[in-house]
Image (cartoon, helix red, strand yellow):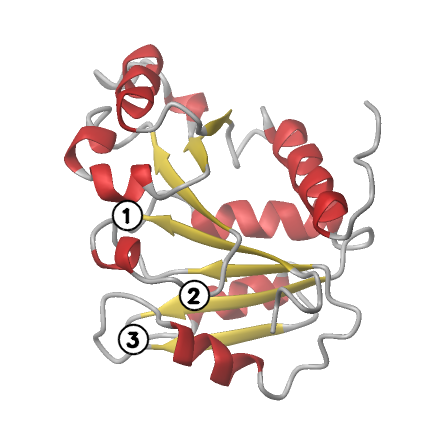
Amino acid sequence: MLAERKILALNLVSSPGSGKTSLLERTLKALGERVNMVLIAGDVQTENDAQRLIKAGGRIVRPIVTGGACHLDARMITKALEDIDLSAAELLFIENVGNLVCPSSYDLGEDMKVVLISTTEGDDKPLKYPSMFRRSSAFVINKIDLLGQSDFELARVKDNARQINGTLTTFELSCRTGEGLNGWYQWLEDQVALKKGRPPKQP
């Protein structure tokens, strides 16, 4: 269904607290007037993330409360999209449940998985969760404004990720300060254009 409509679908995956919702809030505010976005926010028990995305400017946001399940699946996504007019949609963000194990095995109809970690976690995350990094196309390192506050090393986490998947597109950014976000925004617009069969904009 998504492929027929040439809608770019991105499945955002991370541990809890890495900053998926914060990244989507910043993305909505920056690109909301240029890219037609649909958002699905998965959570185990609440609709808090969905409410945050609506407040940030999300016009089409659908929550999925799994009731304890540690991942989303394609049936949940299909049901969430049933009452949405997708004729103008260009980009679907699926914010998965905070977990780096279960979601790696489920295809939600996405074009790509985007795995996100933060500098408040261990820089060995790619080695501990290789399946997720192997099946992802992009790697976001969030909270770079906190580098130096722990033993997390940027070079080491990138090297660990490359050992698992040498084709990852990597972004280093801070949702709090805005550093590095322009590169993320440009990549999103380029991917939407490619999905629609248009050439990406020249920098």
Q: Is residue 5 left or right of residue 22?
A: right
Q: CA distance from mark 2 to mark 3?
A: 20 Å
Kindly report which numbered mark, 1 or 3, lies closer to the viewer in this rendering: 1
Q: Quadrant of the N terminus?
A: bottom right
Name which residue lies at 29% across and 75% down: 45
Q: Nearer the viewer, residue 46 or 10?
A: 10
Q: Position of residue 124 (x, y in %)?
A: 19, 26
In the image, residue 11 above or below residue 203: below
Numbered tag placed on residue 86 in the rendering = none
Numbered tag placed on residue 15 in the rendering = 1
Q: Nearer the viewer, residue 15 or 111?
A: 111
Q: Residues within 10 Å of mark 3 (few under 14, many from 20)?
A: few
In the image, residue 75 above or below residue 160: below
Q: Is residue 188 left or right of residue 77?
A: right
Kindly report which numbered mark, 2 or 1, lies closer to the viewer in this rendering: 2
Q: Is residue 93 left or right of residue 195?
A: left
Q: Earlier in the sequence, mark 1 or mark 3?
A: 1
Kindly report which numbered mark, 2 or 3, lies closer to the viewer in this rendering: 2
Look at mark 2 in the image and give the residue it sits on: 108
Q: Earlier in the sequence, mark 2 or mark 3?
A: 3
Q: Provide the secondary structure element on which disc 3 rests.
A: loop
Q: Provide the secondary structure element on which disc 1 rests.
A: loop
Look at mark 3 in the image and give the residue it sits on: 45
Please name the amino acid that badge 1 sits on: Ser
Q: Position of residue 109 (x, y in %)?
A: 48, 64
Tally of marks: 3
